[in-house]
Amino acid sequence: MNVTHLECAACGLRHEARRLHNLCVECDKPLLVRYDLGRAAATLTKESLRGRRADLWRYREVLPVEREENVVSLGEGWTPLLRAERLGAKLGMKELLIKDESQNPTQSFKARGMAAAVSMAKELGASKLAVPSAGNAAGALAAYAARAGLEAHIFMPRDTPRANIVECEQTGAHVTLLDGLITDCGAEVARRKEAEGWFDVSTLKEPYRVEGKKTLGYELAEQLGWELPDVIVYPTGGGTGLVGMWKAFDEMEQMGWIDGRRPRMVSVQAAGCAPIVRAFEEGERAAREFADAATVASGLRVPKAVGDFLILDALRASKGVAVAVTDEELLAAVGEIGAAEGLFAAPEGAACLPALRKLLERGEVKRDERVVLFNTGAGVKYLEAFGG
Ligand SMILES: Cc1ncc(COP(=O)(O)O)c(C=O)c1O
Ligand SMILES: [Zn+2]
């Protein structure tokens, strides 16, 4: 067991490991898990990874679960990093790659975070888990909670894609649909959790979803032979995957696996809900709530993220950028990626393509750079968006 403590990402206050936490007790900001990385690196070596299980638990030493029997798994992680040769050629690029997260359990990258969060909830004794969700996190929580024998209480906007609602119902969750946005759902969980005895697993309001998501960074490095790409293009709502990857890169450097070079991190948002893009462009440290948020890419409809400052810090430290694309552009990109690569991407994932096009046109990404797009989910869950 290599966890030493939890640390507030804003004020640095130390919190004890091995007990349930939400935000920092002093400043209400996210807590991050800290490890004894020297100790982790003694058994977690590049060579040792060779024979390990083909899921995210291959990085066991840098994951927070102490006892093996508490690992709740449906086979999450270790998804393909596909070469997108046809799409790359259309863009005049030498090396374009797509990390295909639609191949996770429940068909999205949310499985990574929830596998870690539910395992830790089980280990630390929470029995009723609650979450506000744009859709995919709900499906993932419902599945992992069922697998662990825990209760899932899910709050989603009424206009969440139907597939997300049905999957939660069919995996035994308690589902409440609200007229409003994910922020309204979050407020409802906050209002009721104490009386109901729920543990709130809102992203970055509990410390372990980001640990599951950080494995994206470990996998990327391992799949590329321990050489990170030049640019990572990531569809950003709550930003947990981006913050997680950024953390993973630091951990890998501390373990001596990579050097100090980092990919430029690009946050993609929908024009109808782009708080991070606006804050990035205005030079703000945090993002104001985005009014009247609207986009068919439901996972990107996050008007206010608790980890906004962590996303913005990573974008700036990496010399990256934030880009908004319209719904028209991202929906057209679903068909373009599908026809070129045989991948029916989620609208959120597809949004990476028009964002990349803009950056190529502006000269901010060069055609000979190695670029990874993140397809975070499966298009088949969004039939309404395609007239289904
Ligand atoms: C398919 C998909 N992509 C991207 C996101 C945004 O993810 P994050 O919260 O890590 O920024 C979501 C969130 O719901 C999603 O469902
Ligand atoms: Zn703090």
Image (cartoon, rainbow, N blue to C red):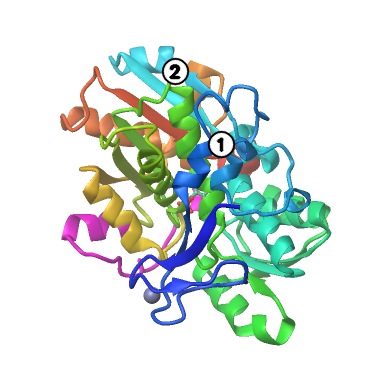
Q: What SS does tag 2 mark?
A: loop
Q: What SS does tag 1 mark?
A: helix
- Decide whether residue 276 is among the magenta residues: yes
In the displayed structure, would residue 205 be above or below residue 231? below
Figure label count: 2
| Relative image position of residue 84 (x, y in whole percent) | 44, 17
- Residue in view at x 29 percent, y 33 percent: 259
In the displayed structure, would residue 128 be above or below residue 315? below
| Relative image position of residue 125 (x, y in whole percent) | 74, 69
Q: Label 1: which residue?
A: 43
In the displayed structure, would residue 53 be above or below residue 204? above
Q: Amino acid at mark 1?
A: Thr
| Relative image position of residue 150 (x, y in whole percent) | 80, 63
- Residue in view at x 45 percent, y 35 percent: 374
Badge 1, how many Cα within 10 Å: few under 14, some, many 20+?
Answer: few
- Decide whether residue 269 is among the magenta residues: no
Q: Is residue 388 visible?
A: no
- State the extent of the magenta-drawn residues as a range: 275-299
Q: Label 2: which residue?
A: 84
- Residue in view at x 43 percent, y 20 percent: 225
Q: Main secondary structure of the magenta part?
A: loop
